[in-house]
Image (tube, rainbow, N blue to C red):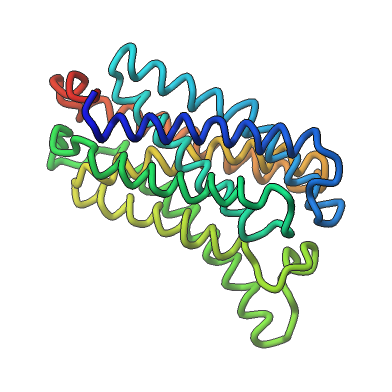
Amino acid sequence: MNRHNKWITIFTIILIFLSLTATLGGLFIDNLYQDNVQFTQIWKSNDFITLCIALPLLIGAMIYTYLKKSIISLLIWYSMIWFLCYNYAFYVFGASFNAFYLIHLSIYTLSILTIILALIHFPIHDLKVSNKKSVLDYIVVGMMLFLSLGLLSIYSIQSINFALNGVLPAIITASGHVTSVVFSLDISMVVLFFILASVLILKRNPWGYLIAFIAQLKGVVYMFVLIYASIETNPDEVPVWIFIGLLTLISLIVLTFQLKKVIHPALPSQLL
């Protein structure tokens, strides 16, 4: 194992223990969250999905990468680091100050550092992308642009409505926050990366495939958070999250098929 991969592994193990502490504390410590009833339930739903889906995926992918030197498991590993970054950004910026603030901030900050190190040292030049685009590429790009434009439209309409009519977006009214953390994080951490990945795939840049995989798998797992939270707080939203989750999952499967075609045979030996 080279020095850089050593630190990525060490940071991942720290993130796992911090996340276990955060999720178990969130689920079993009474009155940890200081938000209203609806958002306290959202945090607990988030803790449950992180504990039962995201962390097992992260642990399993890390172990499998060491055993089999699989590029796909490596990307699953990185995807779950990105999930922790996105997920705990909501706790850091959206939850009322609580006893676990430093734990949540540590997860958010360390996951940023870990994903930067992981991508800097990824052997990207060993991914051989053909200059010819396929129908499957357009399917992946089309899905990401569809979701990006959808989110931008929804958030922009609500923001413009406030600018013109003074009507606050419902998410701000429900949360009691001074601004929309959801709008801010989704545009900067979902829309931006989907559009960037789309452009890079169309330009036949291998980074597009990696960014798309990491962003989409994170999205699929986070849909479980939204579905589970909506069941508890707003059942009418469940079909929307299921639809988006299935759309993202289909695109992820297509993307994985495309990604396997561009992996150089010599790559696995260079992973660790």
- Residue shown at the point (23%, 32%) measured from the top left: 3
Against 158, is 84 above or below? above
- Residue shown at the point (48%, 27%) measured from the top left: 58
In this rendering, position of residue 27 left or right of residue 69 = right
Q: Quadrant of residue 262?
A: top left
Against 55, is 145 above or below? below
- Residue shown at the point (65%, 72%) measured from the top left: 158
Q: Position of residue 127 (x, y in %)?
A: 17, 33
Q: Quadrant of residue 154?
A: bottom right
Front position in the image: 238 or 218: 218
Total marks shown come to 0
Against 73, is 106 above or below? below
Q: Residue pushed farthest bottom?
A: 164
The C terminus - image quarter: top left
Front position in the image: 244 or 101: 101
Against 241, is 155 above or below? below
- Residue shown at the point (67%, 43%) measured from the top left: 226
In this rendering, position of residue 178 left or right of residue 129 = right
Q: Position of residue 267 (x, y in %)?
A: 17, 24
Q: Position of residue 203 (x, y in %)?
A: 20, 52
Q: Position of residue 11 (x, y in %)?
A: 42, 36
Q: Residue pushed farthest top?
A: 67
The N terminus - image quarter: top left
